[in-house]
């Protein structure tokens, strides 16, 4: 008897081959994941000079993506820390001297000589709302940055997985009741 004449068991669940995003969406995701894995494997800097250059490059990308000029970023950093010349030169200073555009340019163009202080990374992240400088540090350790959107997608994936498992259990319970 040929296979085409055999009947399919009615108790088995059928698999739906309709994907909401289609095969191209999944292939695009696979390509993106592969690129991330390749970048992570080669992300470690050889020494402190290369690492400071990588951080400076990450800061430059964050500033470029933000749409702010470097001068605007300097003003926002000084506002963020509440820096002014008057407060820095008071009898009891309440802050450091304000950051200048020249100093920021030195941090970004000569990071081997003038590595950027870590507290500026925090301010730049807050101002640009870009995780790129932090991503450089995380990826050098084999870690990844997850945005709020990434976390929502992961939670949805886990929820879909649990729903599929519940549906499977329901069907198993339903078929066992019919057999009695």
Image (cartoon, helix red, strand yellow):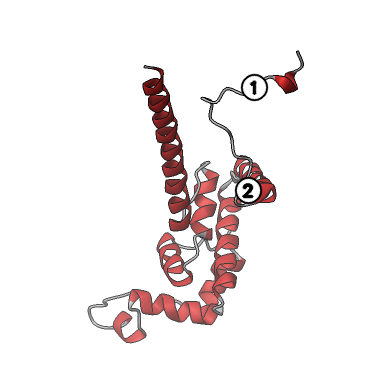
Instruction: Name the residue that disc number 1 marks.
Output: 7
Q: What element carries label 2?
A: helix
| Above or below, 163 relative to 112 | above
Residue 133 seen in this snapshot: yes
Residue at the left extreme? Answer: 92
Instruction: Name the residue that disc number 2 marks.
Output: 29
Residue at the bottom extreme? Answer: 86
What percent of the width, then of the height, locates residue 48?
A: 55, 49
Q: In which quarter of the image is the C terminus?
A: top left
Q: Earlier in the sequence, mark 2 or mark 1?
A: 1
Measure how far apart labels 2 and 1 are at the Cα level: 37 Å
Residue 42 seen in this snapshot: no
What percent of the width, then of the height, locates residue 89?
A: 31, 82
Q: Quadrant of the N terminus?
A: top right
| Above or below, 16 relative to 133 | above
Q: Does the residue at mark 2 contact the one at mark 1 (Cβ under 8 Å)?
A: no
Toward the viewer: 178 or 160? 178
User: What residue do we see at 26% from left, 76% from top?
Assistant: 94
Picture quadrant of residue 42: top right
Mark 2: few/some/many CA within 10 Å (<14, 14-19, 20+):
few
Q: What element carries label 1?
A: loop
User: What residue do we see at 57% from left, 61% from top?
Assistant: 58
User: What residue do we see at 77% from left, 16% from top?
Assistant: 2
Mark 1: few/some/many CA within 10 Å (<14, 14-19, 20+):
few
């Amino acid at each position: 008897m040929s296979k085409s004449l055999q009947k399919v068991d009615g108790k088995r669940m059928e698999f739906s081959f309709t994907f909401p995003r289609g095969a191209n969406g999944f292939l695009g995701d696979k390509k993106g994941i592969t690129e991330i894995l390749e970048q992570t494997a080669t992300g470690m800097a050889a020494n402190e000079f290369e690492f400071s250059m990588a951080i400076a490059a990450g800061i430059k990308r964050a500033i470029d993506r933000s749409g702010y000029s470097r001068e605007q970023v300097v003003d926002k950093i000084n506002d963020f820390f509440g820096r002014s010349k008057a407060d820095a030169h008071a009898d009891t200073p309440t802050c450091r001297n304000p950051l200048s555009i020249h100093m920021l340019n030195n941090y970004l163009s000569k990071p081997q000589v003038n590595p950027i202080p870590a507290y500026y990374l925090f301010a730049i992240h807050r101002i640009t709302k870009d995780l790129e400088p932090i991503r450089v540090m995380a990826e050098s350790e084999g870690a990844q940055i997850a945005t709020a959107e990434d976390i929502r997608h992961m939670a949805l994936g886990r929820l879909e997985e649990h729903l599929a498992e519940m549906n499977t259990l329901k069907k198993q319970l339903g078929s066992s009741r019919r057999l009695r």
